[in-house]
Amino acid sequence: MAETTRGCPISHADFGADTEIYGHYALLDAHREESRFHFNDTTPRGFWMLERYDDVLEGFQKHEVWTTHARSALNPDATLELLPQDLNGEAHVKLRRVINPFFAPAAVKRMTPMAHRRCVELIEELRPKGSCDFVAEFAIRYPTDLFLALLGLPVSDGEFFLPWSETLFAGFFGGDPVAAAAARKNIVDYFSEAVNERRANPRDPKEDMVSRLVEARVDGEPISHEDILTICMTLMLAGLDTTRSALGYIYTHLARHDEDRRLLTREPELIPAAVEEFIRMYPLVFQAGREVRQPENFHGVDLEAGDVIWLGIASANRDPRKFPEPDRFVIGRKGVNQHLGFGAGPHRCLGMHLARLELAVVIKEWHERIPDYRIRQGTELVERGGQLTLTTLPLEWEV
Ligand code: HEM
C-alpha cells in the first residue's frame, strides 16, 4: 500500500462499473478491512471513503458541516435538482415538515389494502405463465403503481408512465441521452398537468399529496410550481428504482435459500423482521455523498472545504464490528434496526415506511401463491454499479 494522500491509502476501485452479483460488497468488505479510510481517485474530484459503521453514522450526523451539495460521491456535480435532498439545515426541515405526513406510518397504513390488492393482481397475471423476468415484469411495475396511487393519480397510467421512467433511469446509467431527455419532458408535463388539475379542483389536503403541496406555505410563501414538479420527480427517482432493486436481491436470496423461503412461507409473521435484515444485508444505495463546508480533521484525516465524502452505507451494514457474521441472514438479529440502509440523520429516507410495506406485502402475497421457484439455469446475474440493481432475474416455477 505505497500510495497515499493526506496520509490515506488510495483506492483505484471503480464503483460505478457493473460486476457479477455481490461483486461490490466483496470489494467494499476488502477495502474496509484493509484500512479505516481510503481516498478514491476514480472520479474528477475524488472522494474520501468512510467505511466503518461508527464513522459512517457519525458522518450522517454531521449535516451542519457536511451537506448534500454532493449527493453522490460518484457523481458529486450532478445537475439534476432534487427536493428535499438538495436542501440543508432549516430550509430542509421546513420542506420535510410539509411532505412527511404522507410518508408517516399512519399514512402508509392507509395504503395497505390497496397495496395488497394491486400486488395480488400483478402476481395473478404472472402465475399461470410459470416464469417471468422478475425485475422487468414485477419488481418495477409494482412500486410504479403504488407511487401513482400515492400521488392520487390513476394506477392505469402506469402503462405509459413506466416506459418513460425506465427510459429516464437508463439515461443515468449509460442509456440513450436523447431518449432520456424526451422521457423526462413527458414525465414533467404529466406531473404539471396533475398539479394544474389540483389547482382547479383541490381535494382534501390531508389525503391528497398534490393538493397539500399546492396549498402548503413555507415561510408564508407557496411552493413554486417548478418546485412541486421537482418534488414529484424526486419521489419517482428515489422510490421506484430502489424498491425494484431491493426486490431483486431479496428474491435472489430466497430462490437460493430454500430454508429461508420455506420459513417465511410457513410463518409470514416473520416477514417484517426479515425485510429489515434484507435491507441490512443487501443495501443497494451503497453510498451517500456529502460535501465538506469547512476544513477539519476527521479522526486523523485532514479534510478541506469542497472535499467530497463517501458515506459507505454497504460497508457499514456489513461491518463485523457492528453486525457479527455480517454475511449470515439472521431474522431477528440483535440491533438490526440500527442498519444504515435508509441512511440516518435529517436526510434519512422519506419513503422507508412505504418501502418496508411494499417489500413485506410482496413477500407475503407472492409466497402464498408461488411458494417455490428457481432462477433459470445458466443465468449469470449482473449488478449495475453506481446504485445497485440486478439487470434481470429470470424466475421459473411449476404451474
Ligand atoms: C428499499 C427501498 C429504499 C432504499 C434502500 C432507500 C434508501 C435511501 C437512502 C439511503 C437515503 C438517504 C440518502 C442520503 O442521506 O443522502 C434515502 C433518501 C430518500 N428517499 Fe429512500 N430508499 C428507498 C425507498 C424510497 C421510497 C419508496 C421513497 C419515496 C417514494 C423514497 C424517497 C426518498 C427521499 C425523498 C429521500 C431524500 C430525503 C431527504 O433528503 O430528506 N425512498 N433513501
Image (cartoon, rainbow, N blue to C red):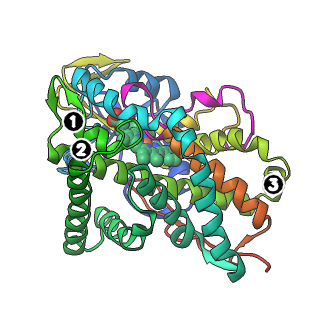
Which label was assigned to residue 76?
Answer: 2
Task: Read off the residue under disc 3.
Answer: 265
Residue type marked 2: Pro
Q: Residues within 10 Å of mark 3 (few under 14, many from 20)?
A: many
Q: Nearer the viewer, mark 2 or mark 1?
A: 1
Image quarter (top left, top right, bottom left or bottom right) of the C terminus: bottom right
- Marks 2 and 1: CB-CB under 8 Å? yes
Front residue of 2 and 237: 237
Percent across and percent down for residue 90 are 24, 20
Percent across and percent down for residue 102 are 42, 37
The residue under the point 68% across, 57% down is 253
Image quarter (top left, top right, bottom left or bottom right) of the N terminus: top left
Sooner in the amino-acid sequence: mark 2 or mark 1: 1
Front residue of 79 and 48: 79
Residue type marked 1: His
Front residue of 35 and 246: 246
Residue type marked 3: Thr
Which label was assigned to residue 37?
Answer: none
The residue under the point 21% across, 48% down is 199
Q: Residues within 10 Å of mark 1 (few under 14, many from 20)?
A: many
CA gap, disc 3 to disc 1? 44 Å
Percent across and percent down for residue 306 are 17, 31
Front residue of 369 and 32: 369
Magenta segment: 327-351
Q: Is residue 349 at least partly visible in the picture? A: no
Q: Nearer the viewer, mark 3 or mark 1?
A: 3
Q: Is residue 49 left or right of residue 22?
A: left
Task: Read off the residue under disc 1.
Answer: 69
